[in-house]
Structures are given as C-alpha cells and as structure tokens.
Image (cartoon, rainbow, N blue to C red):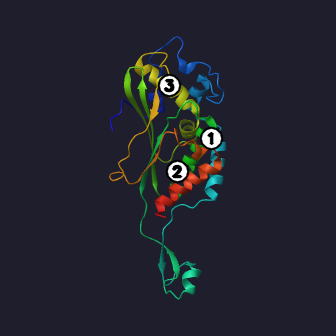
Amino acid sequence: MAYDLTFSSVEEILEYINSKNFPHPISRTTYSEKGFCLFTWDEAIGFMKNGWTVSKKIRIEAENLEKSLEAPHGYKYETTGEILDVGAFLTGKPECWLEPDMVDNRKVYKIVVNSGYSANVHQEIVKNRGVAIVSLVDLLQEDGHIVELEIVKVTRDILNKKELKIRFEIGTSPLDIDKLSFMIANPAFLRRIIFAIEEVYLNTQNCGSYGQSGDIIIDKLNEPNTIYFPCLNGYERRFETIENAKLEVERIINKIKGE
C-alpha cells in the first residue's frame, strides 16, 4: 500500500508539524467537549518529546490483564514429560505427559494499529485499547517472539483530497513504553498531532470535519503474522472497559495458538 506520508522518528514528526506557521490552527485550539481530548497542544508536544508519564498506570493495568492470560506456549504429548494430563492418563493413553515443544517457534509478529476513530469515541476507550495493545506486545515478547509495531492513519474525504494515508514506523522491541503509550492510548496523538500533520499537508489551519477515518487491508496470505487493530469506528464496545479489552487480547492470543 502506498502512503502519502511516512514518519520514522519523533523528530521527523515534530519537524514536519513545525514547518508551517498558521495563526489559529484547529489542532492547537481548546476543544469544548472534555471527553474529546483533555490535553492541550503544549501537553501533546511534551508527550511526543518526553513520553506520557501516566503510562505507568497503563503498565500496571496491562500487567494485571496479563496475569490472567497465557502467552501462546507450545506443548506436545510424550510418554514422559513435565506435566501429567490426568484426563489422558485415565483413558490409558501412553502419551499422557506434556513436554514443552523445544522446536524454535519464535516468530516475528507485526502489530499494525490504526489510530483513527470518529469524534464520538470517548478518550477512555482509546486508553483501554492502548492497554490491550501493550499487554499483547508484552505477552508475545515474553514468549520469545519479535514484535514490530506500526501505526497508520487513513483519512478519507478530507477537503479536496479523496484519501490521505499516514504511516508511523515504530520499529521492533525494546520499545519506549512512555512514548508508545502516548501514540496508541492518548487521544491527543490523533486530535492534536495527526490533525496538525493534516493541516500542514493540506496547507490550511482548518481541515473542516477532518475527514472520515478508514481502514487498510492486510494481505493475510503474504502477511500471516500481522495483527491488525482497525480504526475504532464500530469496534468501540470491544474496549469499553478493561475487562472487554482483556477479552479482546484473549481472543487474539487464542487465534495465535490455533484454538
């Protein structure tokens, strides 16, 4: 998929949004709806540079979520092993012991996060989804897998442009959790930083409704290990609560394990 803009670092993003100086850009104004974005422009820039310190709370919530989930470890049945499967033993099956599969099952998983969502998506839902993504990254890394992260934003029907596609290349672990949490769990990343990018790209301080968020298509045949988090439009209920976020991570982990 071709992208109009690709950013590989925080420095590139900041340089781009500061390349034009509008007198009163929407991305820097005070929003009247508190649930839309509580954070100011200066706070958003600070988070981009230094990370979002509330990510410590996200980390705690993610760790609590992980405690009730299992990473996708692989086991195989043998005549001897570490764990006795009582059910198999009682049936008289000789291969009733579970032994860790020593075959190197490590993979490279690419997690693609679509940062788009409509104006009515509350920032608490954005944060809950961020907790889910941090948890999934942790679980995969704990199981020895390599995780590559990418953030995308697709905007359709914005001013005179049919579609604008932006990609943020985050890279592989270890990941800066403070900066990662801001980009995937704080509404100011979309409603301040990405809005500012769109303003510069379209050379205007007001992009109107700022378009409609759209999705990308993942080619599962050629990218079987890509895990895609679509834009939140229509998926809000999956992340309404931390418990819902946990169920979503569990669903993804079970899919990876083939259950």
Q: How crowded is mark 3: few (under 14 residues within 10 Å), some or many (20 or more)?
A: many
Report the front residue among 241 and 58: 241
Number of on-image labels: 3
The residue under label 1 is which amino acid type?
Ser
Q: Residues within 10 Å of mark 1 (few under 14, many from 20)?
A: many
Residue 86, image quadrant: bottom right
Report the front residue among 42 and 219: 219
Q: Which residue is drawn at 56% across and 19% down?
A: 28
Q: Name the residue under label 2.
A: 137
The secondary element bearing badge 3 is classed as helix
Report whether 78 appears left or right of 33.
Answer: left
Give the farthest residue toward the top: 23
Q: Residue at x 64, y 25 (%)?
A: 33
The residue under label 3 is which amino acid type?
Phe
Q: Mark 3 points at which residue?
A: 195
The secondary element bearing badge 2 is classed as helix
Q: Name the residue under label 1.
A: 55
The secondary element bearing badge 1 is classed as helix
The residue under label 2 is which amino acid type?
Val
